[in-house]
Image: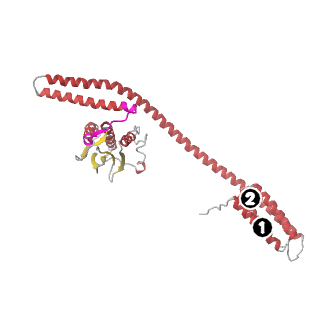
Amino acid sequence: MIKSIQISPTFAKGLAIGATLFIFGIDWLTPTLINISIFYSCVIVMLAWTNSLRWLWGWTLLTIILTFADLSMGNGPGLGYTWVESTNRYITAFMLIVTAGFAHFSILLGRKLVTQERLLAEIAERKRAEESLRKAQDDLARISRITTMGELAASIAHEVNQPLSGIVINGNAALRWLANVEGSSEGLNEARQATERIIRDGKRAGDVILRLRNAFKSTPSEKSKVNVNEIVREVVLLVRPEADKLKVTLRADLDEQVPPALGDPVQLQQVILNLILNGAEAMSTITEHSRELVIRTKSQGNETVWVEVQDAGVGLNPDQLDKIFEAFHTSKPGGMGMGLSISRSIVENHGGRLGAKANPGPGATFHFSIPQFH
């Protein structure tokens, strides 16, 4: 590969001065019949690297003067000063002017090319800036829509929380009335159990609404001692109808020796629910093998509790591993790209980490860790 020679303007000027002195000395010592000053053309070419028209034409005039000065001051063997020698010097002067003209053209061309290169670089940079601005505007528009939805959700949460509180209050009242009823028939026991389930579900829904409202008030979540296995069982029970609809088999591989963890049970439910639904949807188009989703729990030493959600779906593109947790990044046609981003924020707020990896076989595994309760 041929590379262009790069010479700094300062070095080119120094080289021109040195070459001029050398040529003048040789021309002064040799007979005038030998026209050494013709090599001044090399000096003119060197001056093209200075990128200075003033230096080019000023030094060209100087070399023409030196050309004729050598003719009259030479210390040759006395061959005389003939018209042939004078003509050679005039031809040399003309050649120096022509060479300077070509150098002048090359300097102007070089400046034009540099200007065009800078212009192209500025255009490319402007296009990148416009693309970044367009993406920022799109993200801002989506954030604005989500903010509007959030305000609406906060309003709904406020309204829904009141009837939920009424459900719990009425359920407790019903339990008190049932307790006063004499007898212990099977029907009464079933009524008590149904009422207890109503109260339990009402309280759970109330907790969800409360945390939703706190999220919009920037209220920090309350972390407590939680049983991760129980959280997984509750989520599996909740999501099983959706899994059956997608023909996905859920399997919980839970380590019963897992110690309690420190966290917000409702937020952890949201994380596990999101990972399970993502895995189930990733297998919705799979036909060549069974659609099985496995949820595992285990402990890591005395520090953290580990949760894995392994699917057998379409898998992950290695190039996308760093982007799947970014806000608004989604591979679903109707997705918003917020689920994994919010899940990572929740896990990191618990002092843990959420990650993903491609399986050796089909599918992918999402995993997160949270601190143990001490």
Task: Say if residue 290 shows up in the picture.
Answer: no
At label 2, the amino acid type is: Ala
Q: Which colour scheme is used?
A: secondary structure
Q: Are there few (<14), some (14-19), or many (20+) residues within 10 Å of tag 1? A: few
Task: Say if residue 109 shows up in the picture.
Answer: yes
Task: Classify mark 2: helix, strand or loop.
Answer: helix
- The vertical placement of 298 against 145, above or below, is below
Q: State which region is magenta.
A: 213-230
Q: Quadrant of residue 84?
A: bottom right
- Mark 1, mark 2: which one is toward the viewer? 1
Q: Within the magenta stretch, is there residue 221?
A: yes
- The vertical placement of 353 against 195, above or below, is below
Q: In this view, does 275 lie to the left or right of 20?
A: left
Image quarter where the C terminus lies is: top left
> Residue 259's x, y, as percent?
25, 45
Residue at left offset 36%, top offset 50%: 357
At label 1, the amino acid type is: Leu
Q: In this view, does 290 lie to the left or right of 181?
A: right
Image quarter where the N terminus lies is: bottom right
Q: What residue is pinned by disc 1? A: 21
Q: Is residue 194 left or right of residue 135?
A: left
Q: Which numbered dot is residue 103?
A: 2
User: For this rendering, which residue is in front, 246 or 349?
Assistant: 349
